[in-house]
Image: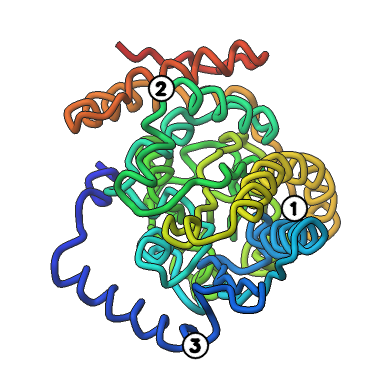
Amino acid sequence: MAQQMHTENDTGKLRMKKLSILAAAAATVSTLATSAWADHTITLRIGSGHPPGVVYAGLMIDYFQTELKSRVEAQTPHKINFVEGYSGSIVKVTEVLEGVQDGILDIGGFCFCFEPSNLPLHAFQVMLPFGTMDPVTSLKIAQEVYDEVPYLTDVFPDKFNQILLSRIADGGYNLGTSFAWDELSDLKDQKIAGAGLNLNWLEYGGVSPVQSSLATAYTEMKTNVYEGWIMFPSAWVNLKLYEPGPFYTLIGFGSMTWHGLTINKDTYNELPADVQAILLEVGKDFEQITGSVNLSEYDKQISTLNEIITVNEISPEVRAAWAESLAGWPQTLADDLEAQGLPAKQVLNLVLDRAEANGYDWPVRYQIE
């Protein structure tokens, strides 16, 4: 199964290779940072493997950095400077957790999808596809689950030397392709890209999955490495994926809260107390903004796509059939994660219950025992 392709693969050789890459990146920026905050100037290395055209990464620049700098400088004697490392210029999409852990970045934004070994439970909404397409509701569900399961927050300082500042909601996922389709059978033998666990949405539906990332999506679509992507509309618009993929199908896989913004724990502990308080405050506000901005932008992005490419909405019957093909998958995942000592059954059942409590009706009500 596809999840077996994303099991523990962090061998000693790979770890050493990644650390050497990170160390080289650190050497290029280390002279720009200080831990002493001389003259009340605080320099923070911040970045993501994703480009600013991905909504949350753009908001890191336009909202998080702007607000943190503004509030700190208005409310304290300190000044904030940022060394930016977006689009993988300091660490790649698969290296952000390690990069923050090792201090290569002070603050990093990343998708939990790229950490199947380190954070196998944090992509819990992806394990229950065809959920709400509303990112505000998705975020609210995730917040309620985190509140009831302390492990989800505590694992960052306990194991990875960092503090979770924000949970980040995505816009709702649909399917963009280079070809038209109407039935699930039309996708068979087509290569479709995804990231991490959502590859299973494809495999269980009988589609050929390809692991990829947005950093290489345009080129790989253009050169026919694959013929489509499970993707939210903002990326299809902002990264111009509509050029190699002129068909965008509204299928409603769901909005997923499966990104995070973290800060290195040592960096955080060195910050003045007043700056720490503002940082946490801005982190909470940024969290909410990721949901509301993605919600407000969704219809605009679909309208934009309607003007330049073909946008179709799949029939409810096809959507239900695809969901039904995945009906047994959450239980399989839960059993595997429970065997690793993780509270997967509690988390997944909480997601199901909280979604319904927030007004969502599942097309297929997954059962996890």
Residue at 48%, 28% in the rendered image: 146
Label 1 packing within 10 angstroms: few (<14), some (14-19), many (20+): some
Q: Which mark is residue 31?
A: 3
Q: Amino acid at mark 2?
A: Leu
Q: Name the residue at 20% across, 29% down.
A: 341
Asked which quadrant contains residue 338, the reply is top left
Q: Quadrant of the C terminus?
A: top left
Q: How many marks?
A: 3
Name which residue type carries label 1: Thr
Q: Residue at x 28, y 74 (%)?
A: 19
How far apart are the alpha carbons under marks 2 and 3? 45 Å
Q: Quadrant of residue 178?
A: bottom right
Asked if one can make out residue 191 in the rendered structure from this viewpoint, the answer is no
Q: The residue tagged with tag 3: helix, strand or loop? A: helix
- Position of residue 251 relative to residue 237, above or below, is above
* Badge 3 or badge 1: first in the primary sequence: 3
Q: Is residue 83 visible to us here?
A: yes
Q: Earlier in the sequence, mark 1 or mark 2?
A: 1
The N terminus appears in which quarter of the rendering? top left
From this view, report whether residue 153 is shown above or below residue 78.
Answer: above
Residue at the spot of label 2: 348
- 185 with respect to 101 (left or right): right
Label 2 packing within 10 angstroms: few (<14), some (14-19), many (20+): many
Residue 242 lies in quadrant: bottom right
Q: Mark 3 and mark 2 in contact (Cβ < 8 Å)?
A: no
* Three-letter residue code for mark 3: Thr
Pick the residue in front: 272 or 11: 272
> Residue 150, labelled with which disc?
none
Of badges 2 and 3, nearer the viewer stands 3
Left-right relation of 339 to 329? left
**Residue 310: mark:** 1
C-alpha distance separating marks 1 and 2? 35 Å
